[in-house]
Amino acid sequence: MNREPVKIALVGYGGMGKTHIDNIHTMGNARVTDICTLDADAQPAIEELGARYYADYAQMLRESHADAVIVCTPTHLHADQVRQALLAGKHCICEKPLCLSAREATGLFNLAQSQGVHLYVAHVMLFWEEYMALTELVRSGRYGRVLDIALHRFSERPAWSSTSWLFEREKSGLIPFDLHIHDLYFLISLFGKPDIACVQHGGNVGVGYDEYLRVSYAYPGITAGAEASWYNAPLPFTMGFRVYFERAVVCFDGDNLVAYEQGGGERRLVWHEKKDALETSINVSPTSAYLHEMEHFVDCIAHGVPSDVVHPQQVIWTIEALEELTALLDAPGG
């Protein structure tokens, strides 16, 4: 049976919003019907997309017939905008982080349940081919159990931000909530909520925030760590991991996923059939991960079901761990 395309309203017409719009445009089962942004100059481009332009979010929620709202605004606006969408009876897809408080996140999930709608959080690493492949390796036990896992995510200072909100702790949560969150959520999706074993952080004096962060997490029988940076240097964005299993080391350098198997040499892993990678409007190379993500959430919306990939409890655990990490960074001598 043919279904009507899922109608989507979007708030936030920056890099991430445009990336989602571009991906949805390639999908046959969804369309963007309304876009809200304070940038009045964007109205012609929005109308050219076949969407209705709004400068007022509350007005969009009142007038839109969309099934769902995507929230792609600065982090400190997420909680209130998600709450408004849920109260309007709309499903909601929110960019990570959902918010900066685990208590507030719990309240939003509870509100979605009471409204009879679903709240989805866009933790895109669970849709990235190489990270999906690693998840399969861990869960299948193909190389035995994990002994050691190290993840990294390096970037230059995000000077592309149109305003300074990213560099204000109370608005963005800085590196922990903006960048490190990707690898922490991924660890939690694999192994559950960890204890924080050790934290190293620092950077140039007078910057006002940490420029690099290195965190060791404690899991039974596993050493785990993740690094993140906003370097004051033009380092291209890079991410990757190295995982030591009982019978192999699996490495992702941002381009290649390779397993070095005991007694078997080097094996390049091609795990999932890749669709044509799409350009992004952010500082990330072309990828189909955002398309995988949006296809999944749209399918969930079409069937009125929760996500079986991004789980509310894991979202809450991630924010709880980030709150603990932030408290350690803020502590005297931390």
Image: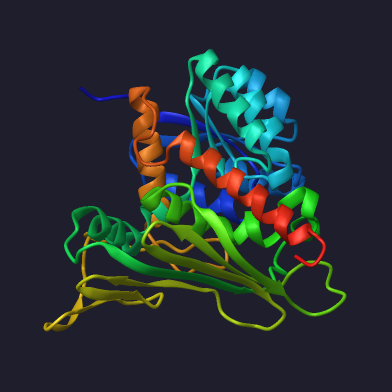
Q: Nearer the viewer, residue 127 or 281?
A: 127
What is the quadrant of residue 6 in the picture? top left
- Of all residues, the one furthest to the left in this rendering is 264
Query: Is residue 249 visible from the viewing direction of this image?
Result: yes
- Of all residues, the one furthest to the front in this rendering is 220
Please name the residue shown 68% across and 39% down the image: 101
Q: Nearer the viewer, residue 69 or 99?
A: 99
Compared across the picture, whether 291 is left or right of 94 comes to left
Using the image, determine if residue 210 lies above or below residue 167.
below
Q: Quadrant of the N terminus?
A: top left
Q: Position of residue 121 (x, y in %)?
A: 51, 40
Please name the residue shown 42% across and 47% down the image: 192
Q: How is the image coloured?
A: rainbow
Q: Quadrant of the C terminus?
A: bottom right
Query: Is residue 97 visible from the viewing direction of this image?
Result: no
Compared across the picture, whether 204 is left or right of 271 comes to right
Using the image, determine if residue 303 lies above or below residue 42.
above
What is the quadrant of residue 134 in the picture? bottom left
Figure label count: 0
Q: Nearer the viewer, residue 28 or 87?
A: 87
Please name the residue shown 78% across and 66% down the image: 209
Compared across the picture, whether 151 is left or right of 248 comes to right
Q: Position of residue 269 (x, y in %)?
A: 21, 71
Using the image, determine if residue 290 lies above or below residue 207.
above
Q: Nearer the viewer, residue 50 or 2?
A: 2
Q: Position of residue 212 (x, y in %)?
A: 66, 73
Q: Position of residue 260 (x, y in %)?
A: 22, 80
